[in-house]
Amino acid sequence: MTLQQLKYIIKIVECGSITEAAKRLFISQPSLSAALKEIEKEYGIEIFYRTSKGISLSADGREFLSYARQIVEQTQLMEQRYSNRKPAKQLCSVSTQHYSFAVTAFVKLIEDLNASEYEFTLRETRTYDIIEDVKNFRSEIGIIYFSNFNEKVLKKLLKENHLKFENLFEAAPHVFISSRHPLAKRKSVTIDDLEDYPFLAFEQGSYNSFYFSEEILSTVPHRKTIHVSDRATLFNLLIGLNGYTVCTGELNSALNGENIVSVKLDTDEIMKVGWISNDKAPLSSVGEKYVLMLKQAVRESGFAVANTF
């Protein structure tokens, strides 16, 4: 085993494929595959499962990756201390549902680190993919929510994949609508009030179970529904079609402009928003700092941060 081989495995995990990792490492795919097989043979384990859909870390692979990252990080620290090398490039990957506070925290993290070099990834993506990203170490942190409806199912899925959920804050459901919407001046609205307007929801791809829906009250029937894949499209449709979506109510006008408003939804439901991580590996120093920035962004949005972690 060599340090370079450990770096190869880390890069494969970050990229999600051997082909893409080889491109970024500027080596051939056969050479990278050979290096991987050499380590697997040396330690008698299978680090990745190979399927027609790609690769994923095995149970042994997740544990091996944890050790590999520690070794590489410690080596970099030693090189900086004794060889006067410049600090290693800062790395951080986060997968999240579509929350403004997650973006705000990411901006604050980068500004605060003031690193000369970094390579960060922020994925606003589907619920199932967030869980897969953290499970396979493509992302260090994922941000999702629990409701009375999905909590039992999602907790079981997280436990099966060695992931843990830390509560960040709780929020009463709101709707986002255009500032020119007929209901925009109301202090609160009901689902019945919204019946004639298009309901906008983030599509969940193949895993479109109600349990993975990003919008609470996902089982409520709607006469008009539009599925979208990104936040900009959703906001454009909110304005153009007088549509609505269900959310926490957290809205950042600096990021989203003044054309969208938040109105409370009359319901007894509560959204528990939190972050997930892989319990097989501790958070990096950058990951820990991002969590602190999440708390700060949540407080600045007017929510009380949970004290369970």
Image (cartoon, rainbow, N blue to C red):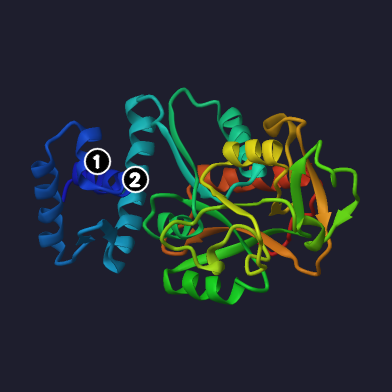
Amino acid type of the residue tagged 2 in the rendering: Glu
- Is 9 situated left or right of 148 in this image? left
Of callouts 2 and 1, the N-terminal one:
2
Splitting the image into 4 quarters, where does residue 253 fall? top right
Q: Position of residue 263 (x, y in %)?
A: 82, 49
- Classify mark 2: helix, strand or loop: helix
Return the residue at label 2.
14
The answer to whether 309 appears left or right of 52 in the picture is: right
**Residue sitting nearer the eye, 256 or 200:** 200
Indicate the position of residue 191 as horizontal and vertical percent values: 78, 62
**Residue 286 in view here:** yes
Label 1: element kind:
helix
Question: Label 1 is placed on what type of residue?
Answer: Ala
The residue labelled by disc 1 is: 21
Up the image or down, 184 lies above or below 82; here it is: below
Residue 210 x %, y %: 56, 68
Q: Is residue 249 visible?
A: no
Quadrant location of the C terminus? Answer: bottom right
Q: Residue at x 21, y 61 (%)?
A: 51
Horizontal and vertical percent position of residue 10: 30, 47
Compared across the picture, whether 298 is left or right of 72 comes to right
Q: How many marks?
A: 2
Q: Are marks 2 and 1 in contact (CB under 8 Å)?
A: yes
Q: Residue drawn at (11%, 60%), measured in percent from left and top?
A: 42
Which circle marks residue 237 in the picture?
Answer: none
Location of residue 295 with respect to 255 vertically, above or below: below
